[in-house]
Image (cartoon, rainbow, N blue to C red):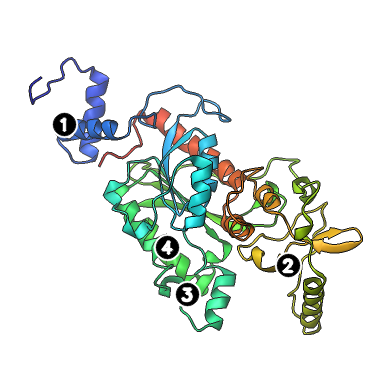
Amino acid sequence: MGDNILVRKIPADLRNWIELERQQYQMTQQEFVLSVLKDASTVYQPTLTTNSTKQVVGVTNYLPFTFIDLFAGIGGFRLALTKLGGTCIFSSEWDKYSQKTYKAWFNELPFGDIRQIDPESIPNHDILAAGFPCQPFSIAGVSKKNSLGKAHGFDDIQQGNLFFVLANIIRVKRPPVLFLENVKNLKSHDHGRTWKVIKEKLEELDYWVNAKVIDASGWVPQHRERIYIVCFDKRTFSDRPDFVYPVPESGSNPIFADILENAPDNKYTLTDHLWNYLQKYAEKHKAKGNGFGYGLVDINKISRTLSARYYKDGSEILIPQPNKNPRRLTPLECSRLMGFEDREIVVSDTQAYRQFGNAVVPKVVEAIGKEIVRVIDNHYKSSKRCLLKTS
């Protein structure tokens, strides 16, 4: 075969498509066709570029898609998006213990420090999913940093500026859809200035921006409010998409009792010393008019928010026991409380508590993901044009 490849007898509809696409990206026909072939040779799998009628599990007549999993944690986004027919083609997580869990669950070791990633090396993808670091913006994180006289938000060099690393990846790869998650406090931090900077940066990158705080209690028996940010590339979606955030299904009322183990190990029962300390601590703050204290959960209702600090004493979610001191959640119960079901725990209890406390709730991600897939599927069917970026 010679160095030059000549393709004859291209159907009229394909010629029209090539012309539309190459004009959009300001490329010659040859440049565009070669870029498509290069992408196909790099990652050959079904994506939104595929004219496929494959039915996605759990969703009717939706096309398969690809996504990347940044700040991946233990893979809450990946579990949810895979259920919707997505294929993860790249992941990144810096914490070595979370990497261990991710490797055990998905047989893939995520790339480490996201600051060391060359954005150009990341495969083209349909959805960029990222639960970017929340501590600089969280209520607990801000309080702690203020008490220590440390900077927070975008003044936190080590963590706050990671958003701009993420923004640079978005700028280079321009995925059609961004699916981001953060703590509820993101919008109110620094009198709203932090959110203003983030939103303006996403809009500057030419995305339609949607954001809403959602309580996971409609999907899991836990009060857990997080902000979910869903953005659509204006260069792909010329009009603002009719995206809507989901609401829990009618009659879906999960209760805490559903996640409890039948015979938990006695090591999770609080010692007399710790139980007495927590009660005295609560009494002291109650006398001062403060609300600090332990949380004894009603197992027929929902619990407080599971936090990453749960490993310290478990005080925010304690389970009453007949004729004995309350107990902490087991790691397996934490997994169920977050909606991960009965997954294998491959790290210590301390690390498991941290991992589940930092995780996204897969059931909430899946519910939002269904709406995202509905939008991009409708766009593909109506426009007959692929979403996957080639330039």
Disc on res. 198: 4
Q: Which amino acid does label 1 sit on?
A: Gln
Looking at the image, can residue 204 be seen?
no
Residue mark closest to the camera, 1 vs 3 = 3
Mark 1 highlights which residue? 29
**Pointers 2 and 4 in contact (CB under 8 A)?**
no
Which quarter of the rendering shows the C terminus? top left
Position in image of residue 143 (x %, y %)? 57, 77
Position in image of residue 294 (x %, y %)? 76, 69
Q: How far apart are marks 2 and 1 (CA)?
A: 64 Å
Q: Which of 59 and 377 is in front in this view?
A: 59
Asked if residue 149 lies left or right of residue 317, the reply is left
Q: Residue 267 occupies which quadrant of the picture?
A: bottom right
Dot 2 or dot 1, earlier in sequence: 1
Q: Residue 28 occupies which quadrant of the picture?
A: top left
Mark 2 highlights which residue? 315
Residue mark closest to the camera, 3 vs 2 = 2
Q: What residue type is labelled 2?
A: Ser
Dot 4 or dot 1, earlier in sequence: 1
**Pointers 1 and 3 in contact (CB under 8 A)?**
no
Q: Nearer the viewer, residue 327 or 163?
A: 327
**Above or below — where is 3 with respect to 122?**
above
Residue at coordinates 28% horizontally, 35% vertically from top-left?
A: 42
Q: Which residue lies furthest to the right in this view?
A: 323
**Above or below — where is 239 with respect to 55?**
below
Residue mark closest to the camera, 3 vs 4 = 3
Mark 3 nearby-residue class (10 Å; few <14, some 14–19, many ≥20): many
Dot 1 or dot 3, earlier in sequence: 1
- SS for callout 4: helix
Looking at the image, can residue 252 be seen?
yes
Q: How far apart are marks 1 and 3 (CA)?
A: 49 Å
- SS for callout 2: loop
